[in-house]
Image (tube, rainbow, N blue to C red):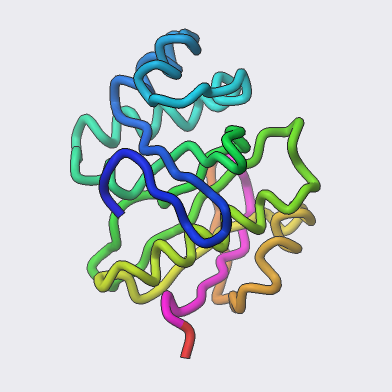
Amino acid sequence: MSGAAHVDGHGVVLVRLDVATMAALLDDDLDRASALAGVPLTPYFLTQNWLWRIRHDQLLTDPAAADWVARAALVAGVPVGHVGFHGPPDDDGMVEVAYSVDTALRRRGHARRLLATALDWAASEPAVRTVRASISPDNVASLATLRPFGFAQVGEQWDDEDGLEIIYERPARPL
């Protein structure tokens, strides 16, 4: 799903955030970031600077990852958050999904809509065989979002920033 914007069957418009847009977000310049993205980003995007730093640096070293990471997600023209993957598929065809909903817009089904969009995106890419999600066992909302999508627990890991995470996976194209 390359390109600047994509509309999916869940009513979500995805807009790729490039290096320049992420740099503007890192500079706390919402007006410039919005102009570069071509959509009005909200102040929530400025609260995600930890992510923009990671993705900005990632794209500087691997520009091809831009097709996979951090897209603004709009529903009915309103930016509700962002969705993407940690990067392109690895050698085993695995991608790890990442999504976040603006705190002011939570509990309205947006997370489920963003996850469904990411899963459709992964299923449309022939190189992807497995979708992974890593979630803190204390993140009740994210666990509930994941539940109806057929993910199975496959292990756990320690993240230096987030602590214990449970690893869930599912086939990109369920049988």
Image position of 135 (left or right of 83): right
Quarter of the image for residue 154 reads bottom right
Residue at 47 percent across and 91 percent down: it is 175
Give the farthest residue toward the front: 76
Query: Measured along the vertical axis of the image, is residue 20 above or below residue 82?
Result: above
Q: Which of 132/128 is in front?
A: 128
Residue 38 sits above or below residue 3 on the image: above
Q: Quadrant of the N terminus?
A: bottom left
Camera-nearest residue between 92 and 156: 92
Is residue 115 left or right of 130 when viewed as pictured? right
Q: Is residue 113 magenta?
A: no
Type of secondary structure dominating the magenta stretch = strand
Residue at image point 61% right, 18% down: 43
Is 163 inside the magenta-drawn segment?
A: yes
Percent x, y of residue 111:
66, 51
Q: Position of residue 51 (x, y in %)?
A: 47, 32
Whole-percent x, y for residue 53 in the image: 40, 25
Tell me if residue 101 comes above or below residue 42 in the rendering: below
| x and y percentages locating residue 114 in the rendered image | 57, 53
Question: In terms of image quadrants, where is residue 78?
Answer: top right
The quarter of the displayed image where residue 162 is located: top right
Which one is nearer the viewer's eye here, 143 or 167?
143
- The magenta span reads 161-173
Residue positioned 76% across, 31% down in the render: 104
* Horizontal side, residue 15 vs residue 167: left or right: left
Q: Is residue 114 above or below residue 144?
A: above
